[in-house]
Image (cartoon, rainbow, N blue to C red):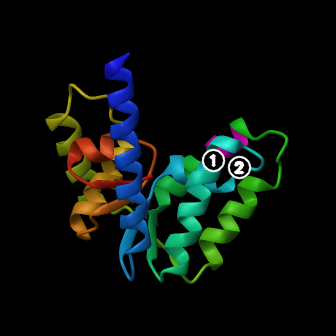
Amino acid sequence: MLLKIMIIIYMGKVEKMMNKLIKNMYNKQIFVDTSAWFSVMAKAKKEHFKIKNIYHELLENNNELITSNMVIGETFTLMRMKLKKELDSPFEFLELCKNSQKIKKILVEEYIEEDAIDILNKYKDHEISYIDATSFALMKDKNIDYALTLDSHFATIGFTIIK
């Protein structure tokens, strides 16, 4: 019981530190992963409200949100499969990525894919997807330290997760 109380207190402190970090983030480049995009775009899902709020706060603080063509494709496909009642949501997501001035899409080039394969080989003992590995390689190439994601693999590779 004592351990459970200590964990709850620790998690509360971590959340307060994360909230402070987010409020003080201005003019940064932040990579946005599929898990975060899904949370931002899903309608009426209570568990996604926190990510949606962080997303809007990051935009208000003049941060540039970075994503890749591969993440956009993965997100679109995930939305088509999981949000069957929200037929327009995947297409709204594509329009958002295309038209927003604060979202920058970067094409994954061949050298990034080669770096991604190196990452996959280095972290064989982790269940990292190919698309995540391209995201990590892209973030390293562009010196992006922060990721809006629910995926703990970003921290495994050494990035700061915002959630």
Question: What is the x, y in percent for residue 144?
Answer: 28, 67
- Spatial CA distance of label 1 from label 2 is 7 Å
Q: Which residues are magenta?
A: 76-81
The 10 Å Cα crowd at callout 1, few under 14, some 14 to 19, many 20 or more, is: some
Question: What is the x, y in percent for residue 147?
Answer: 38, 58
Does residue 81 lie above or below 79 as drawn? above
- In this rendering, which labeled residue sits more in front, label 1 or label 2? 1
Q: Secondary structure at mark 1?
A: helix
Q: Are the two marked residues, 1 and 2, in contact with CB atoms closer than 8 angstroms? A: yes
Does residue 117 lie above or below 52 as drawn? above
Residue 48's label in the rendered image is 1
Decide whether residue 124 is among the magenta residues: no
Residue ranking furthest to the left: 122
The one nearer the camera, 80 or 161, is: 161
Question: What is the x, y in percent for residue 59?
Answer: 54, 76
The amino acid pointed to by label 2 is: Ala
Q: Which residue is mark 2?
A: 42
Query: What's the magenta bit mostly, secondary-structure-wise?
Result: helix
**Residue found 39% across the figure and 80% down from its top:** 26
* The N terminus sits in image quarter: top left
Q: Secondary structure at mark 2?
A: loop
The amino acid pointed to by label 1 is: His
